[in-house]
Amino acid sequence: MSEIIVRKVEGKKYMDDFIRVPQSIYQHCPQYVPDLESDVRKLFDAKENPGLEFSDIQPFVAYRQDVPVGRVVGIVNRKANKCWGAKNVRFSMIEFIDDKEVSKALLQTVEAWGRERGMDTMQGPLGITDFDKEGMLVEDFDLLGSINTIYNPEYYPRHMEALGLEKEVDWLQVHIDIPKEVPARYARVAQYAREQIGLRVIKLTEKQISEEGYGHRVFDLLNEAYKPIFGFSALSSNQIDRYIHKYLRMVDKQLIPVILNDKGEVVGVAISMGSLSKPMQKAHGKLLPFGWYYLLKALKWHHEDNAEMLLIAIRPDYQGLGVNAMFFDDLIPIFNRFGFKWAETGPQLEDNVRELSQWKPLHPKFVKRRRCYKKKI
């Protein structure tokens, strides 16, 4: 067997190879949802990715006889390491053929790159922020992926274990069938929260987001609510501007309930959207010539059968006061009106019992277990 050579991605040719690696791995995989190629390129552009202000990042491609057979990204998030008192190098966007020499070469490259920067532990898959894709899929490989989560072949976890990586944390996703009516428990608690606590639901307008500061208020809440969560580092003002442009302005505002208290403070937000999995598959990772049409159609005119519940955040002093019930009380009728038959959350930490238990009245299924691995280097 010929030697595996891992090269730094420097210049357009190697970036093109980096982007093409998944095409051969997933060409016959109906569950895989590709990233937009333009989004991948922007990850490594300091003008497009404010996270590079506090992170070192380096993509690599593995070759055998000049044929790309794998890829990986090394990341050192200096802000997260300072926050958690750690010296972690993260690996991200890892893809490889079913050959342990390839996966070994990729991970050893990240280890060496991390050691050069004074790191002592490798962990991943993790992105720069908690809003990037994270966690290697270890179960339910037969289920359709999504635009905000990692999909990978079944052999990936076996490679990680064979190479000495161990579990650090697991996430689960929650799958629910949308009920025709709001469960009585949610309706009752939501009414209490409105009448006794003075909470109310609003839907943001473009003017509120851009001119009245609600976009930043929402992400300031996310920073506060997610602060104790594994691996999180606070979003900078520039990152918040980027996420407002990328997400809040794209998603139908009817699907983003924002909870205000009696002082007008933002104390809760839920961001959901119609699934873009099938439109992204049709686009094949490209906006041109027709990818933009499939995505716009799904966002504006024709919704798929399911919704993606991207995130929920509640100000710590309002947790347990009915905010979750208000989200469900608001969204379930809207999901029905949009024709959504089922919904799935983003990854939620398996040990966050309080968060996972909130779904009980909806008879949830816990699916798509995914894992962050770690290894001392």
Image: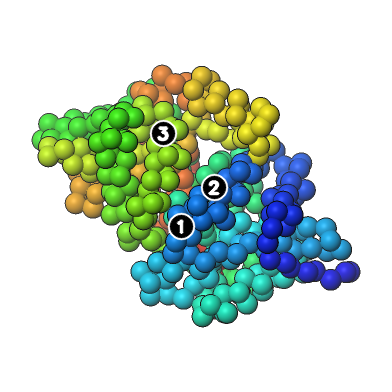
| Mark before the other along the chain sequence, 1 or 2 | 1
Q: Residue at x 41, y 22 (%)?
A: 336
Q: Quadrant of residue 113?
A: bottom right
Going by the numbered disc 3, the residue's amino acid type is: Arg
Quadrant showing the C terminus:
bottom right
Q: Residues within 10 Å of mark 2 (few under 14, many from 20)?
A: many
Q: Which residue is mark 2?
A: 149
Q: Residue at x 63, y 34 (%)?
A: 287
Q: Look at the picture and state if 155 lies above or below 4.
A: above
Element type at mark 2: loop
Along the horizontal axis of the image, is 179 left or right of 34?
Answer: left
Residue 131 locus on image (x, y percent): 45, 51
Q: Which residue is mark 3?
A: 249
Q: Is residue 104 visible?
A: yes
Q: How far is mark 1 from mark 3, CA to CA?
A: 20 Å
Q: Residues within 10 Å of mark 3 (few under 14, many from 20)?
A: some
Q: Earlier in the sequence, mark 3 or mark 2?
A: 2
- Is residue 153 in view? no
Query: Which amino acid type is shown beneath numbered disc 2?
Result: Thr
Query: Which of the 4 quarters of the picture holds residue 216?
Result: top left
Q: Is residue 121 left or right of residue 34?
A: left
